[in-house]
Amino acid sequence: MEQLRLEGPDIGIVPFPTGRGIVGMPVWMWNKPGPTRTGPATASASAGAVTVTATPRVAKVVWCMGDGAVITCTAPGTPYEPRFGKQKSPDCGHMYTATSAQAPGGRYPVTATTTWDIQWAGAGQTGTLNTTRQSQTSLTIGELQVLNVP
């Protein structure tokens, strides 16, 4: 497992952490691909005549959105593109219902935790191990107010 060097998600999220989201607008989340972030990866280790091979795959990513919502995504998520406009993510998204003004630092902390299922085989035996890895970011969510002035 040490040779696999598995990491937490490489967080892709819109609105971008450097920008500002709006209450009621879709948030898109995804895990950017890479062998240590999404797989595929394989590693082998030997001791004497015994070699064990391990192959990890991401089982899920659990997103704690900072407002109490927990979103479980079994797919890596779809990267947002401007052509999607205000559509909701087809496989991994959230929508804030309150601003982040009362959150620490005025930002919602977002934690993404990858659960890895690691299949191993060696010495005539097989099995599965599980491990988790985390990554974090934060988002500012504001409010859009519209005035109807005649």
Image (cartoon, rainbow, N blue to C red):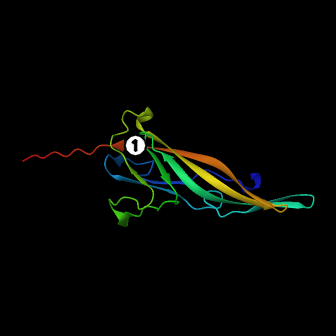
Q: Residue furthest left?
A: 150
Q: Quadrant of residue 92?
A: bottom left
The answer, for residue 59, to whether it is visible in the render is: yes
Instruction: Give x and y (percent) for residue 89.
Output: 40, 59
The answer to whether residue 140 is left or right of residue 150 is right
Task: Tell whether 5 sits left or right of 112.
Answer: right
Report the residue at 45% width, 48% height from top: 17
> Is residue 36 or residue 118 the one in the foreground?
118
Per the image, the residue denoted by label 1 is 140
Amino acid carrying mark 1 in the image: Thr
**Figure disc tally:** 1
Q: Quadrant of residue 60?
A: bottom right
Q: Give the x, y percent position of residue 54.
A: 74, 59
Among all residues in the image, which is located at the extreme bottom?
83
Along the viewing direction, whichever of 71 and 80 lies nearer the viewer? 71
Residue positioned 45% across, 44% down in the render: 65
